[in-house]
Image (cartoon, helix red, strand yellow):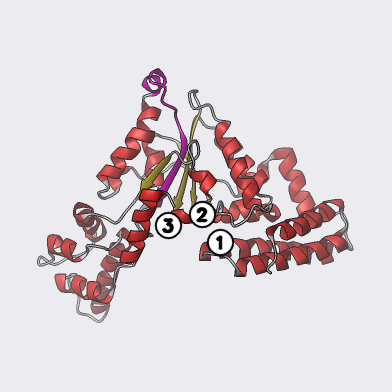
Amino acid sequence: MGVSYSTFERLKSKGVTAYKKGDYAAAGTFLTEAAGCMVELAESSDTPELRRQREEVAAELIDLAKDCKRFEANPEGGRFRQRAKEDEESGAAASDWIVQDKPDIGFDDIAGLDDIKQEIRLKMIYPFSHPELAAKYGINIGGGVLLYGPPGTGKTMMAKAIAHEIDSTFFVISPAQILSKWVGEAEQNVRKLFEAAKQHNRSVIFIDEIEALVPRRKSEGSTVMARVVPQILQELEGFDRKGERALLFVGATNKPWMLDEAMLRPGRFDTQVYVGLPDAPARFRLLEIYLADRPIAADLDLGALCDRLDGYSGADIKNLCMQAAQMAFMDAMGGGERLITHADMLNRIEMQLPSVKPGDLVRFDKFKQTGR
């Protein structure tokens, strides 16, 4: 039987407590054992993303355990103690990993997806832009939003566009930053993230690969994820959705069925938006965008290419345009400068299959219908 999360947390907690007290000999032992547990948990992870998150947590524990040997001769030196003290006194440490931005990407910069844009406007943007009407009709402002769909379909761009459309501060956080910073004290990191968001009238917190932060639980044992979900819910409830300050908590995932079911219940990710593969108008617009500043031949027929690109993601189309441009560039380097032709694009299409398999789309259809 493999190691349990409760064993890891018990060892980690003992190690951190000993570290803060300056008992580096004991701390090193507990932290090393905790890192070993996390490595074993990483090896049994259900997804590559979750495995990567756990490996990063294990790596930080190992680094901290190594510090113990160096600090045994210098009890006043501990990196964790100093960092924790600075964090408690000034909160400055949080700013080292909480990234704030003001995106300049709007809906007009995203090709197609008109139905999705309208759904987002109705559920998220209009309540922000018309707060008095929202209040009159009892419409809450903000809340949780889940963007899900195949890889490369523009979920991150959509999150940025939402922040731009409502003129909000955009917080970009990865699960690794929440789970691994300060030895995986995830609940504190969630709290600090939301505290930073509360400093602004409008905020969008965006976490990609959200399933790595709140994965489906296999048991009822105590785990860090079991504490993160309630902390996130508590912080969301701390925002007054009818007041001046408002928050959107946006998660993006390629594997929504891997999310903890608690996050999919009403009052959590209230809005769930499927961001699928681009339709024909979107594919045409993507070709225009990715070929706009490149020298293209007169025979390059975007409409015909659109038909050939059915089933390709936006990221696929971007890569195809890049590959075709590289073919022409290599000829130019040899002294034969030429334009990017229709044949170049067809050549790359023949060599690059769509990254999203038909079976993947069936899985998303099932989730849309059943929520699992």
Q: Could you say whether the residue bearing mark 1 is in a helix, strand or loop?
A: helix
The answer to whether residue 350 is above or below residue 211 is below
Pick whichever of labels 2 and 3 is earlier in the sequence.
2
Dot 3 amino acid type: Asn
Horizontal side of 214 relative to 119 (left or right) equals: right
| Residue that label 3 marks | 254
Image quadrant in which you'd find residue 37: bottom right
User: Which numbered disc flags the more N-terminal residue, 1 or 3?
Assistant: 1
Q: Nearer the viewer, residue 144 or 57?
A: 144
Residue at mark 1: 50
**Residue in the image at 37% along x and 34% along y:** 123
Residue at x 67% of width, y 44% of height: 188
Q: Nearer the viewer, residue 201 or 41?
A: 41
Callout 3 secondary element: loop
The answer to the question of whether label 2 and label 1 lie on touching residues, with beta carbons closer than 8 A, is yes
User: Dividing the image into 4 quarters, which one contains the N terminus?
Assistant: bottom right
Residue 149 % position (x, y): 37, 54
Q: Position of residue 223 (x, y in %)?
A: 66, 53
Residue situated in front as seen by the camera: 250 or 106: 250
Residue found farthest to the bottom? 334
| Residue 211 disc label | 2
Crowd around label 3: few <14 · some 14–19 · many ≥20 (10 Å): many
Q: Position of residue 332 (x, y in %)?
A: 24, 76
From which residue to which does the magenta span run? Answer: 131-150
